[in-house]
């Protein structure tokens, strides 16, 4: 042991002197060396989510700044307290429990994406066909444009010729739904409060972590990507309900 001490002794005194002269520099350099790998890994995970319609040097810092404001996403008490009790789902009692656990979502929620349970290419194609079908069949109610929220996907919005029917539609920037075709084919939709409650409790959706804030209404849901034809049918019913609620229409094709 004494031999080891004698070997490193010539280096200890210069190191101690350097620390005494430049303590802030040494501390900041050490902190950077510790944090840099975390930031590199965090950026890569954010980038793998598919990004946003913003340059990466803007989108990633935005995602980091948003993180402390995130909330839990599966409680439903706020919908019990909501005075709007109607449902826009057709036969809501027949919506089944979704099989299996909820998908894992990313650490970041800007963008909000799921990391597992990704659908097959065939299911992805069918999901797009469903969105396109209802956009075309309800052209008097809705139109397709760049998503006001994500700026990277086509979004289904209330037709420009129609008035904004209620405060939630205004808060949601009149956007009804979009699906994340770059990565996981999950969806964001805005639904009636009691439909949100039912879909969350039966495992089909969760709230966005910053829903219920100035940024997003509490009715802004993250709907999980469908895995098979049965789930596609349920997702189609959810989309029709979102169109009906957001346009205040009971006749959606």
Image (cartoon, rainbow, N blue to C red):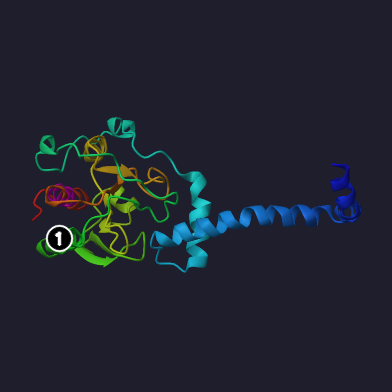
Residue at coordinates 32% horizontally, 50% vertically from top-left?
A: 116
Quadrant of residue 32 in the image? bottom right
Residue 171 in sight: yes
Q: Is residue 186 magenta?
A: no
Q: Is residue 214 left or right of residue 147?
A: right
Q: Is residue 77 left or right of residue 192?
A: right
Locate residue 18, reporting x and y percent. Answer: 87, 56
Task: Kindly report the secondary structure that dominates the magenta region of the rendered protein.
Answer: helix
Locate residue 228, reporting x and y percent. Answer: 15, 51
Of residue 90 and residue 6, the one placed in the foreground of this image is: 6
Of residue 194 and residue 2, the one placed in the foreground of this image is: 2
Q: Which residues are magenta?
A: 232-240
Q: Which residue is mark 1?
A: 126
Residue at coordinates 22% horizontally, 66% vertically from top-left?
A: 144
Q: Is residue 236 magenta?
A: yes
Residue at coordinates 32% horizontally, 61% vertically from top-left?
A: 183
Residue found farthest to the bottom? 55
> Circle 1 sits in a helix, a strand or a loop, which is it?
helix
């Amino acid at each position: 042991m004494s031999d080891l001490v004698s070997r490193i002794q010539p280096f200890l005194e210069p190191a101690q002197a350097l620390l005494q002269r430049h303590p802030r520099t040494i501390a900041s350099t050490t902190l950077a060396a510790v944090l840099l790998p975390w930031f590199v890994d965090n950026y890569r995970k954010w980038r793998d989510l598919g990004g946003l319609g913003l340059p990466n040097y803007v989108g990633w810092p935005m995602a980091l700044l948003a993180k402390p404001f995130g909330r839990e996403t599966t409680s439903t008490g706020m919908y019990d307290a909501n005075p709007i009790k109607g449902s826009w789902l057709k036969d809501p009692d027949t919506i089944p429990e979704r099989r299996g656990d909820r998908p894992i979502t990313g650490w970041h929620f800007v963008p909000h994406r799921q990391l597992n349970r990704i659908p097959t290419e065939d299911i992805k194609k069918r999901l797009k066909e469903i969105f396109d079908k209802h956009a075309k069949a309800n052209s008097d109610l809705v139109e397709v444009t760049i998503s006001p929220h994500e700026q990277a996907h086509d979004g289904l919005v209330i037709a420009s010729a129609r008035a904004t029917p209620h405060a939630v539609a205004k808060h949601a920037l009149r956007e009804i739904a979009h699906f994340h075709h770059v990565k996981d084919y999950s969806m964001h939709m805005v639904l009636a409060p009691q439909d949100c409650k039912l879909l969350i409790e039966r495992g089909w959706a969760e709230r966005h972590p910053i829903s219920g804030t100035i940024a997003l209404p509490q009715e802004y849901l993250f709907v999980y990507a469908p895995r098979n034809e049965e789930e596609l049918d349920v997702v189609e019913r959810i989309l029709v309900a979102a169109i009906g609620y957001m346009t205040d229409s009971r006749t959606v094709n």
